[in-house]
């Protein structure tokens, strides 16, 4: 089974506009049209049974509207393998009630993006959200490391992630992009043994997709990927593509090429995510 724990979709009426803006900010082309149907087609072509969509609120005012859309996705498509996480923002003051409500209506987790939300990961505003998420049993997935749309900005370094774990303790916490995009040398040093998960999104492989500005974005060398997998153990690594910004099919092939045991690949591709999210294997 293949579970893609890191994808993005947008409402049909907004998808084209949002993809155009984000494409120019990051200098890369999308692989789908950014809609739910586009993701479903990609899943079918790539052989992905389950995808998790990760909405991001760039202001506190967006939280409830985004979560209404996410709830509709789950109502209509969770039985068909598409699971939407919810959004939260560090400036959203009603976070305790909202996180409790999200858990009660069946959401499996929340997504935060420190760069887009202009807040360091170990800021007290995030810490109180994570503490409440841990209390009610929601998975937290965060962007980690650099973001190509924000050159030079790191709002979630391995050190900051370590500070979160020190403050909150053990909770279901996923660091995207192999623990910190572009900070990969620091990830095993600072985070091995902490109990966090990492996902493979937009990280595994020699180059990212052809950019609209020309050239290709360098990703991690296989040796670095293997170092992180060894440091965390394959049981703490989750497959993710970052669709539509990476091809699900190509992302799968990149992980298949890694020099690790087939049992480890099975854990990464789906077993770990199924256990984390309560999906029947």
Image (tube, helix red, strand yellow):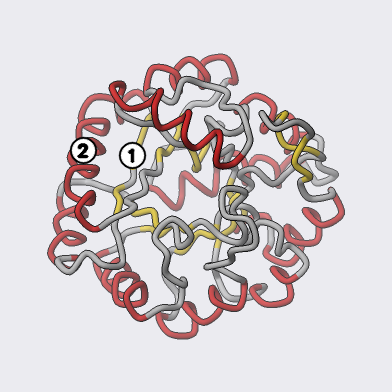
Which one is nearer the viewer's eye here, 141 or 144? 144
Q: Is residue 3 visible?
A: no
Give the side of residue 108 with respect to residue 93, left or right: right
Residue drawn where x is 39% and y is 17% of the image: 37
Q: Nearer the viewer, residue 206 or 73?
A: 206
Which residue is at 24% across, 42% downward? Answer: 66
Quadrant in which the N terminus appears: top right
Residue annotated with mark 1: 84
- Residue drawn at (28%, 22%) of the image: 13
Q: Is residue 159 left or right of residue 54?
A: right
Q: CA distance from mark 1 to mark 2?
A: 7 Å
Q: Residues within 10 Å of mark 1 (few under 14, many from 20)?
A: many
Whole-percent x and y of residue 93? 17, 69
Q: Secondary structure at mark 1?
A: strand
**What percent of the width, then of the height, locates residue 243?**
53, 32
Neighbourhood count class around disc 2 (C-alpha, 10 Å): few under 14, some 14–19, many 20 upward? many
Q: Which residue is mark 2?
A: 71
Q: Are marks 1 and 2 in contact (CB under 8 Å)?
A: yes
Of the image marks 1 and 2, the number of the one nearer the N terminus: 2
Q: Quadrant of residue 25?
A: top right
Q: Which label belongs to residue 131? A: none
């Amino acid at each position: 089974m293949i579970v893609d724990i890191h994808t993005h979709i947008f409402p049909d009426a907004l998808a084209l506009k949002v993809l155009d803006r984000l494409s120019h900010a990051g200098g890369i082309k999308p692989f789908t049209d950014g809609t739910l149907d586009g993701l479903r087609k990609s899943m079918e072509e790539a052989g992905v049974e389950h995808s998790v969509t990760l909405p991001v609120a760039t202001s506190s005012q967006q939280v409830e509207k985004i979560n209404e859309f996410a709830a509709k996705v789950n109502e209509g498509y969770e039985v068909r393998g598409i699971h939407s996480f919810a959004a939260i923002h560090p400036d959203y003051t009603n976070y305790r009630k909202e996180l409790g409500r999200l858990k009660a209506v069946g959401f499996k987790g929340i997504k935060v993006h420190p760069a887009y939300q202009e807040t360091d990961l170990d800021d007290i505003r995030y810490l109180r959200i994570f503490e409440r998420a841990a209390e009610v049993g929601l998975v937290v997935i965060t962007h980690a490391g650099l973001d190509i749309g924000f050159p030079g900005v790191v709002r979630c370094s391995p050190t900051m992630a370590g500070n979160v774990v020190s403050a909150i303790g053990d909770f279901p916490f996923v660091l995207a992009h192999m623990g910190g995009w572009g900070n990969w040398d620091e990830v095993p040093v600072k985070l091995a043994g902490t109990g966090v998960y990492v996902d493979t999104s937009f990280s595994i492989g020699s180059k990212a997709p052809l950019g609209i500005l020309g050239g290709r974005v360098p990703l991690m060398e296989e040796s670095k990927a293997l170092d992180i997998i060894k440091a965390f153990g394959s049981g703490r690594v989750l497959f993710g593509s970052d669709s539509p910004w990476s091809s699900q099919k190509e992302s799968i092939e990149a992980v298949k090429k890694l020099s690790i045991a087939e049992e480890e690949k099975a854990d990464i591709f789906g077993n770990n995510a199924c256990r984390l999210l309560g999906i029947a294997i």
